[in-house]
Amino acid sequence: MWGWWSTLSRDEKWAAFIRWRGLALAAVALVVTVWLGVTNQLILYIHPRYIVFTLIMAAVALALLVASFAARRTHSHAESPTRRQKAITVVGGILALAFAVAMIAVPPATLSSATAIQRDINSTTVGAGSQTVASASSKAGSAFAKFTVLDWSSLLRQTSAASFYQGKPADVTGFVTADSNDPANMFFVSRFVITCCAVDAQPVGVPVYLPDWEQKYAEDKWVRVEGGFTTDPSSKSSEQIALVPSKVSIVAKPHQPYLF
Amino acid sequence: MVGVAGIVALFVVRGISSTWGGLALPNEAQDFLTLSISVIIESLPFVILGIVLSIAVQVWVPDTLFVRLLPKNRVLRRVAISLLGVLLPVCECGNVPLARGLIVKGLTVAESMTFLLAAPIVNPITIITTAQAFGWTNGILIARVAGGFLIANLIGWLFSRHANQPGLLTPRFAAECALPPSHEHGETRWGQSVELFVHEAGTILPALFLGAVAAGLVQVVVPRQVLVTLGSNPLWSILAMMVLAFIISVCSNVDAFFILPFATTFLPGSIVSFLVFGPLIDIKMLALMRTTFRVRVLVQLTIVVALASALVGLVVNFVS
């Protein structure tokens, strides 16, 4: 096989490198996309509404890619690049290929508490319409168990009247992110809300008051917290209402970790 | 044969490696990977669609069709070109291969640039998603569409003044465009299509990967809080939103939904600047456009588009 390589001229070797770099990157991106689609994990990266479109285009590209393996190779029209251009192309190519290796080798994951902190939990009005004070007031007691982290965070933004939360028990699931003002006593049950893809994920969370929580529940662990809201007992935290848990249990990461 | 075996091998490795529990990266590193991969997976179908449309334009549409249908007057011609996005609704990453195809087909570089900048905004999908997100509030929708249209035509006019149009292109791409139109490889159209796919994918994908890596890295490093605190100042909010658009590198078809939650903290003008600037210039787009244009051209383009987007935002801030 390498005997064939040694018969090529320098320009032909360069053309072959350029060709195979592109094909390799295309193959990696397409294989990862299709594999994520087949194993139902594309939702870790993009909103469900784009999944069908993404898979159709990936199938088209995969067909063209396979056809290209069979195609007769044509000559290249590129001018021979200068040494500096070659060096830049090689470095960029190595970087891109290294990233491609990581794409293939590292197991897929959701965003973590690091990004939740970096993007500041509840800093935007994402999902503002998910629940309103009026719609929540008219609901029966059993309805609240179905409220998500997003529903509660939306309500908490709208009202901090403790009386509103009386008789409205919460039962929410999310990952643990420490409260930056009072990390010893408070954490957020947090989720990411995505509108398009993981790039635009906005963290939302329900503040939970539980002194020394860190001894039992590490950051990023997925937990289910049941309890009721009261005026926030913490003096350091900037939250006005907090969930005081009656029960906290560690749960597996849900199949659909993001909210939409 | 080797290629097909390679693809199968990639599937096998991906399947096996997903069960490696021991490979626990620090949170920041893992999130960097997740964000960068998300940029690639989100953009990939649009890039493929763009390449397929570019193949259609280059191989399947008769050579003179585009040139014949467009008006002769140069200003009107660019206006018509900036409305092409209505027929070819690809977002900005797909527009790069398509714009390359249009240059090969005989449009001038300035005309192709007009298309590249107008099409991501003046296209039905972007208009619909922006309308869904904002409706008619504060004139955001109108300012976005009008702003994108005007900036694209301004850029088209500016670069049309350049005497040496091929000199705006990278030497590599200019050499490809300089081939006589009759230059064929004696292949069938299908063969040409496949070869063009390999060529375009090979040009665009490395740029997409590097753009995604840069965008992922910056997002992990720059705290969002820094930008959000600038939200209520008429000037700083515009600059902050443009920096955010530059970093986040999401496609124009979806960016309205992304920015909607920020609408209460930021002034409407800054939202417009985000929606006008982001589709034209961001980390990923610069990496993609570098496949076609010289660095000097990209610097000029970035400066003019940034100033113009900021101006559109300022006007909206003072009017609304």
Image: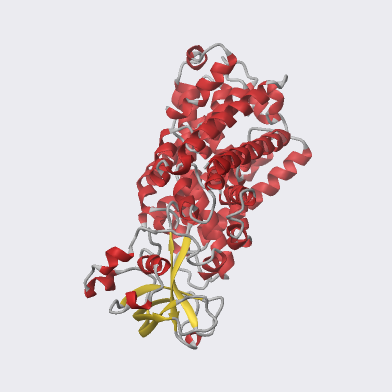
Please state if A149 lies on the left or on the right of B145 as rendered.
Answer: left
Is residue A21 visible from the viewing direction of this image? no
* Residue A44 coordinates in the image, percent (x, y): 43, 59
Please state if B40 lies on the left or on the right of A96 as rendered.
Answer: left
Quadrant of residue A73 within the rendered picture? top right
Is residue A249 visible from the viewing direction of this image? yes
Query: In the image shown, does A112 or A228 lie closer to the viewer?
Result: A228
* Residue A128 coordinates in the image, percent (x, y): 39, 59
Q: Residue furthest right?
A: A83
Quadrant of residue A241 within the rendered picture? bottom left
* Residue A192 coordinates in the image, percent (x, y): 44, 63
Q: How is the image coloured?
A: secondary structure
Query: In the image shown, does A132 or A93 lie closer to the viewer?
Result: A132
The structure residue drawn at horizontal position 47% and vertical position 85%, both measured from the top left corner, is A213
Query: In the image shown, does A203 or B230 lie closer to the viewer?
Result: B230
- The image shows residue B116, relative to residue A40, as above or below, that is above
The structure residue drawn at horizontal position 45% and vertical position 36%, both measured from the top left corner, is B49
